[in-house]
Structure formats: C-alpha cells, structure tokens
Amino acid sequence: MSARRLLLLGPPGAGKGTQAERLVAQLGIVQISTGDMLRAAVKGGTQVGLEAKACMERGDLVPDAVVIGVAEERLRQPDAAKGFILDGFPRTAAQAAALDALLARLGVRLERCVALQVDEDELVKRLLRRAEIEGRSDDNETAIRNRMRVYREQTQPLIDHYRKLGVLAELKGDGSVEEVGARIQGALAS
C-alpha cells in the first residue's frame, strides 16, 4: 500500500508543486499548501484567517501560531481524512514540532517525507526560466539565491528531523517530470 500522508520538502524550483499535482491525481488525496490554506482561511473569515489577514495587510510574515492554526483547520476537513500532501509547510523546526503535535492530536501520523534534491545552479536556471515565462520581473538571480539561502538555513534542517522519525526518502529531483514521479512512487511504496 502506498503512503497517503505526505510531506514534500525541497528548495524553490525543485518541482514540489508539479509532483504534488501528479500525486493528487494518482492517489486521490488533497494537496495542502501554506499559501492556499492562508488564502482560504482569509476568504472564509475564520478567526485564524482574520489574524492571518491582519499580518498580510501589514506586510508581515504570518507567525507560526497562525500558520499552525490554519493548518489544523485544513487538516480537520473531511477531504483530508483519506490522505494529504503538505507542500510549503512546515518550513522551520518550530513548525515541524508543531505539526508533529497537531498530527498526534488528530490521531494520524506522517507516513513519508519526500525530500527532493537538485543542484542549486540548476534550480536557479529553472526559476529564471519560469520567471521569464510567467513575466515575473521580481524573480531575479539575486532574489532566487536569497530564497535558496533561507531554505538552507531554515528548512533543510527538517531533513534530519524526518530522518530521525524514520519517514524520510531523499530523492534526486533532476530529470523529467515522469522520472522524478517514478522515483517518488517507488519511495511511497516502500
């Protein structure tokens, strides 16, 4: 049986979103992304959504407590009961610890953390190409390399956390979408 409660980790441009869409279609589970959760909570006018909206309107980062609250609201929805793919959350060690506690409260556990690894220069090329296609002038090499630094400092340490929990699968994120997808499918089945 394939794992159905998943976390995708990897630096910006590693292909997490693309692979999450494929897994949603293949496994019939929901993708839960931080940005989507925050926008839905704001739109829904929930208490946590109102807190998130106030932060976003000030241009502040949304605090961990608010992100965790939004994640809990989303993970309690009926469609998440049969499985989920977390994308963009957790991003820090504090968020990972809060996620562990949240899943314990919900009576479920993370079954697999897939960490996609891609050479940084390749990631920069991918993101510059994507920025050109999408017309995103704010995504320049300096900004992209800064996002890579933030990932290395804040999110990459989560790899050790999930290795210790025994759910980590570190996979090469280079190659075609299909090749990476096949690696992920193999990791979910083991």
Image (cartoon, rainbow, N blue to C red):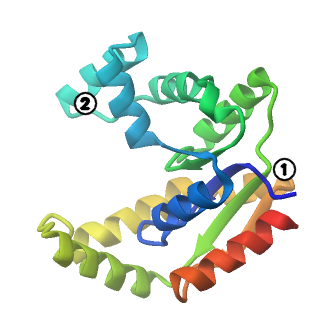
Indicate the quadrant containing the N terminus: top left, top right, bottom left or bottom right. Answer: bottom right
> Residue drawn at (78%, 69%), measured in percent from left and top?
187
Residue nearer the viewer, 138 or 82: 82
* 75 relative to 148 in the view: left or right: right
| Residue at the spot of label 1 | 165
Quadrant in which residue 144 is drawn: bottom left
Label 2, residues with CA under 10 Å away: few <14, some 14-19, many ≥20: some
Q: Position of residue 22 (x, y in %)?
A: 55, 64
Q: Position of residue 83 (x, y in %)?
A: 70, 42
Q: Position of residue 189 (x, y in %)?
A: 84, 66
> Residue drawn at (68%, 79%), measured in percent from left and top?
182
Q: How many marks can you see?
A: 2
Label 1, residues with CA under 10 Å away: few <14, some 14-19, many ≥20: few
Q: Residue furthest top?
A: 47
* 81 relative to 33 in the view: left or right: right
Which amino acid type is shown beneath numbered disc 1? Leu
The tag on residue 78 is: none
Quadrant in which residue 174 is drawn: bottom right
Q: Secondary structure at mark 1?
A: loop
> Residue drawn at (87%, 56%), measured in percent from left and top?
166
Indicate the quadrant containing the C terminus: top left, top right, bottom left or bottom right. Answer: bottom right
| Marked residue nearer the N-terminal end (2 or 1) | 2
| Residue at the spot of label 2 | 56
Which amino acid type is shown beneath numbered disc 2? Met
Q: Secondary structure at mark 2?
A: helix
Q: Position of residue 82 (x, y in %)?
A: 72, 38
Q: Looking at the picture, does residue 63 appear above or below residue 22?
A: above
The reply to whether the C-beta atoms of the residues labelled 2 and 1 are less than 8 Å apart is: no
Q: Looking at the picture, does residue 101 appear above or below residue 123?
A: above
Residue nearer the viewer, 154 or 100: 100
